[in-house]
């Protein structure tokens, strides 16, 4: 499986040489907020929202103090705005009060923040702290199973399989996301123009 993983990584890296986090941010805290907003929302939309949001509140301290109604209005277009506003405000309060305004650098500490789950924490750990974590979102989950990198049925188990195959390749997270976003769509994947057909166990009908 590791040999297959290496072959897939090489092909994906050629297909998407510029694969990277497409969320705009200037600080670790801003990335965390952007990732929370990105749930079931496009990065393009999040970037439009955070451009205005961070003009109003860009640190844990001023985000913790922002009025929840104002926060909801600012992030409304990202969808699920009430739940996201609550998560963002609680997370900001926790960072300000428990970590002196500094973003913690461990999975345990990040997931102790109210509003931060494992996937969100893994994105931050890989992007900010260069840790070997793989965040399994809907794209990573779908593409990994279609390529036969995992046959597990939960994001956590898929994550564990990917870590075994790619122990020192955090970029695989971005490569799988790009492939899911631009080629291996949930509906009508572009199999005819995919360079990974020989490695794929999924055949679109």
Image (cartoon, rainbow, N blue to C red):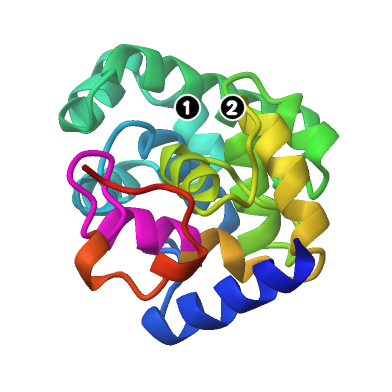
Spot occupied by residue 71 in the image (x, y as percentages of width and height)? 30, 25
Q: Nearer the viewer, residue 100 or 153?
A: 153
In the image, residue 165 lies at what x, y percent?
Answer: 77, 60
Is-magenta flag for residue 180?
A: yes
Residue 160 placement: quadrant: top right
Q: Mark 2 falls on what kind of element?
A: helix
**Badge count:** 2
Which residue: 79% across, 39% down? 107
At x 56%, y 36%, the residue is 61
Q: Residue at x 43, y 56 (%)?
A: 177
- State if disc 1 and disc 2 touch (CB < 8 Å): yes
201 to 27, vertically: above or below: above
Q: Which residue is mark 1?
A: 88
Mark number displayed over residue 91? 2
Q: Nearer the viewer, residue 46 or 18?
A: 18
Left or right: 94, with 138 as reference point: right
Residue 150 location (% of width, % of height): 65, 43
Magenta range: 176-190
When asked about the image quadrant of residue 47, the answer is bottom left
* Mark 2 residue crowding within 10 angstroms, few (<14) / some (14–19) / many (20+): many
Q: CA distance from mark 2 to mark 1?
A: 5 Å
Q: Is residue 157 above or below residue 57?
A: above
Q: Is residue 109 left or right of residue 27?
A: right
Name which residue lies at 17% across and 45% down. Answer: 188
- The answer, for residue 145, to whether it is visible in the render is yes
């Amino acid at each position: 499986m590791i040999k297959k993983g290496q072959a897939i990584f090489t092909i994906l890296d050629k297909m998407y040489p510029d694969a990277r986090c497409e969320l705009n941010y200037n600080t670790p805290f801003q990335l965390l907020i952007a990732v929370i907003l990105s749930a079931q929302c496009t990065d393009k939309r999040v970037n439009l929202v955070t451009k205005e949001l961070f003009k109003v509140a860009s640190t844990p301290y001023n985000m913790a103090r922002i009025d929840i109604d104002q926060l909801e209005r600012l992030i409304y277009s990202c969808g699920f705005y009430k739940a996201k506003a609550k998560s963002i405000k609680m997370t900001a309060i926790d960072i300000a009060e428990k970590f002196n305004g500094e973003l913690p650098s461990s999975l345990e500490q990040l997931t102790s923040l109210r509003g931060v789950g494992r996937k969100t924490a893994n994105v931050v750990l890989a992007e900010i702290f260069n840790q070997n974590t793989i965040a399994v979102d809907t794209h990573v989950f779908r593409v990994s199973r279609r390529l036969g990198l995992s046959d597990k049925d939960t994001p956590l188990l898929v994550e564990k399989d990917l870590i075994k195959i790619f122990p020192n390749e955090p970029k695989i997270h971005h490569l799988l996301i790009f492939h899911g976003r631009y080629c291996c769509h949930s509906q009508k994947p572009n199999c005819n123009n995919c360079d990974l057909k020989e490695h794929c166990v999924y055949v679109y009908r």
